[in-house]
Amino acid sequence: MLLAKFSANTINGRLIARLEQRIRDIFPGFTASVGLSGAALLHEAFCREKRKTVVLPGFTCQQLAAAAVKAGKRVVHVDVDRYTMHPNYHHLIRCLSTVKTDDTILLIDHTFGNPYPSVVDLRRKYPQLLIIEDAVRGLGVRFPDRPMGGGVDWVLLSMYKTIRGNGNGAILLTRSDRIAASSPQAVPTLRERMATVKPLRWFYDAVKRYYPEVRPRSRPVPKLQWTPVYGVPSDLCLRRYLAELCVLEQQERIRVEIAQEVAAACSRCENLTLIQPAARHSASGHFVSFVVKTASRDEGLTKLHRHGLFVLRTWDLIPVAFPELSGTYIYGSEESEFLAEHIVHVPIVEFCSVRKIRRLSHVVCEAFECGVRQ
């Protein structure tokens, strides 16, 4: 009850209590810890956990590795498959055969809402392994054989990776006591307040066209530095996230339909290869992901941005780029580095109109300098 003691009699505390109740309904058997940063929540959980090794996907955010290193863990990265964004299964099994599973934490990412298909198999093979399901960009992802969180030990969720306007907020679900909340409570920024006001959003997007956000990849790579960000989300972020949870299934159906249209529009471009979910699995519909095969990814994204079509690259700077972590890729990093240079993600929240999808269809082939599939 540490979190309740922190702010039970405030508006923020009541919102967090409502969120906890809603999370318990969706994820029975878990305890929710709410904070500003998912990496910070994981760091605190890593510090409590006596296991010594953390296994991570090779194509991921460097903050996760930094959180594990700062907690004193040995970090191992497993290279991914460029056409799934997930760890190479055979490499992962080789990796797990070299460690004590009762002394190991495995984080599996439903990368950009693309569900990882082998969690049930890993749970069966390695019952003593502590498995984390990273769904920060996969809220609403569905599996044919289990609910999200079923069979795993921790689940990481985000309040802002898929919620328009939010700038922070995370939830870590565990099967033990919650992590104590810490002050301060975040104050909504002007950008967060204005993000869902349609006229202001239109003006912001119009201006952003002339200042593309696609910058060159950092060279030289800075030293790995990370500091946990503590606190609790603002009332605004909590309300937006609660509103999303209340209409999750309805919004998921809408997103998936739009995602299918976006995928069809972009698949006409010969230089783009769609990353599709494994058989029988369903992506959450928050993103549609492609690999750029031969054209310049960053030049293409800049062209799209100048047309007001805001397609993303993430992550372009992965852990292997940092000298402190380069030795953690025990089976190589070729595929992860390829994705860092060639991946594009279409955020569905930016393409909820037929007009934008049609514009994307017309411009995407020009942006990536290729022909059109017949």
Image: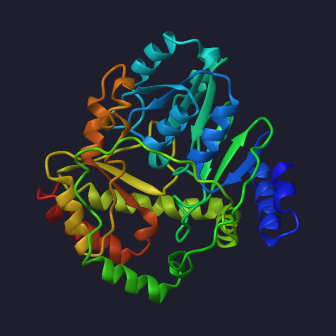
Identify which residue is drawn at 70% across, 32% down: 48
363 versus 150 height, above or below: below
In this figure, what is the number of numbered marks? 0
Q: Is 301 in front, or is 283? A: 301
Locate residue 29 relative to residue 168 in the image: left or right.
right
Q: Is 76 in front, or is 148? A: 76
Q: Is residue 88 visible?
A: yes
Position in image of residue 212 (x %, y %) = 26, 70
Locate residue 158 relative to residue 173 in the image: left or right.
left
Q: Is 268 in front, or is 37? A: 37
277 versus 120 height, above or below: below
Instruction: State the quadrant of the C terminus.
Output: bottom left
Q: Is 188 in front, or is 265? A: 188
Q: Is residue 82 visible?
A: no
Position in image of residue 191 (x %, y %) = 50, 77
Locate residue 346 relative to residue 24 in the image: left or right.
left
Identify which residue is drawn at 33% across, 70% down: 357
Q: How is the image coloured?
A: rainbow
41 versus 97 height, above or below: below
